[in-house]
Amino acid sequence: MVDITTEAPQASSDLRLSRRGRRLLVVIGVLVALVVGSVFAFVTFQPIQVLPRVRLAPGFSLVDSQGDVLTSEDLRGRFVLYTFSYSACETCESIDETMLEIQQGLDTADLRGFPVSMVTISIDEEETPEQMAEYAASVGADPDVWRFTQVEDARFLADVVAGGFGTYYEVVDDGSIKLDRSFVLVDGSGIIRNEYKYQTQTSDSERILRHLGVLAEEAQNSNGPASLAYEAAHLFLCYAP
Amino acid sequence: MTDTLIPEETPAPRQRFSWMYALVAVPLVIAGMVFWWGYNRAQPHQFSGAVIQGSTAAPDFTLWSDDGPVSLSDYEDKIVMLYFGYTHCPDVCPTTLTDAAAAIESLSDDEAEDVQLIFITIDPGRDTAERMGQYVAHFDESFVGVTGTEEEIGSVATLYGIYYRAGEGTEASGYLMEHTATLLVIDRNGNLKLVIPFGVQYDAMAADLRYMLR
């Protein structure tokens, strides 16, 4: 009789503890499921998309077709689209057409007020500013947006174009130049955010304009709590196609 | 009388209590540890500069210190802080080097052992290897100062996103250099990971270094 009265409360205590423990486990399980589910949904549906921070763009000093110096520091704080060409290039028409489409599309693109520059870097060391000016005019470049330039110190041309921007070119024995047609998008911190090898399957200009919008959206949300969501998008590789 | 009826020890219920407690506590502790691990791994560290995600190896180089040739590859398995400046720099370079020294100083000895700062001159005409060695020693004995030819320096600076240009003047009259003032951090895998702008305080740098050393 006495044994019963002393053991009963203990058994009841065990039961309560067990229930509490199970309830706690259920709560933890739900929380973990919610976190995992949220991450899964974030990665699957990608409500926020970003462009990868690929690598550092090179440092340089260029001279444009007006004879003005343009340095990598001058372009800080702007999104810059680079491409590589030269006035005697016979296969660069497609590059210039794409650049022109982008120049025209900037007016209607959703850039949230962020400034954009376009820079063509000549890979012909012998090119004169006059030749570049003529070339720029022939393709319809707006000098306020799209500048034709040359590396100021030709010794570093390969470092800038090939080493820094990763664009292959080669001066062959007959003096002609082999060039890998490409575009490189750089953000306001001087970091390469995407590289585009010229191809004809889809429109490079539409894709680049869309990517400029993605960059602008991220830059606008780069401060405050929203920046964490963008960092998460980088962490989970939610890259804009 | 009643006292004599109550057993002095009740081992069986006590064992059951411990067993049930363990059934709840062990999964809880494991879940807590998993959550804490996941939270720490998933929580993005707020770096003080721009983070580069690509895994392109930082370009190697060989330049000259007062102790002989120095290559980036000499410091495999260490975090390398790269800074481009010059010894006649009146403000930006000494400020950055002071902050970097304070950041390293605030790390534990083991952590500091795994960090190496290399100061690369962008003024090779005036900055000899000996002068570079003397200059960096003012900030931290572990710092390495290197110089090279104009071509070598120009090439390395270009690849690391550094622009520089000499201002008006001669070696006799003196001149200032205009240059990019970012501090670059290369991780232990040899990838350039962080670009710290000028003006970041030493404690923020130290937090970045600690995070990268984890």
Image (tube, coloured by chain):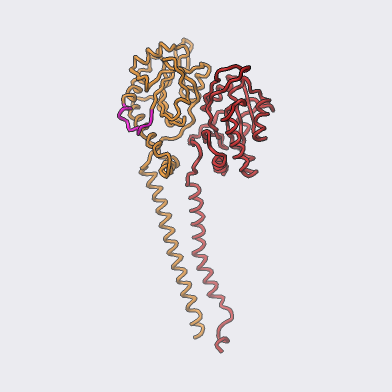
Chain colours: A orange, B red
Q: State whether residue B17 appears in this view.
A: yes
- The quadrant the N terminus of chain B occupies is bottom right
- In the image, taking residue B206 as reference, residue B67 lies left or right, namely right
- In the image, taking residue A13 as reference, residue A48 lies left or right, namely left
Above or below: residue A54 compared with residue B169: below
- The quadrant the C terminus of chain B occupies is top right
Quadrant for residue B72, please give it: top right
Q: Position of residue A106 (x, y in %)?
A: 33, 27
Q: Residue furthest top?
A: A174
Q: Position of residue B38 (x, y in %)?
A: 48, 50
Q: Position of residue B210 (x, y in %)?
A: 57, 43
Residue A158: within the magenta? no
Quadrant for residue B98, please give it: top right
Above or below: residue B27 compared with residue B152: below
Q: State whether residue A122 appears in this view.
A: no
Q: Nearer the viewer, residue B177 or A208?
A: B177
Q: Main secondary structure of the magenta part?
A: loop
- In the image, taking residue B119 as reference, residue A213 lies left or right, namely left
Total marks placed: 0
Q: Nearer the viewer, residue B152 or B178?
A: B178
Above or below: residue B48 compared with residue B134: below
- In the image, taking residue B50 as reference, residue B67 lies left or right, namely right
Q: Which residues fall within the magenta stretch?
A: A105-115
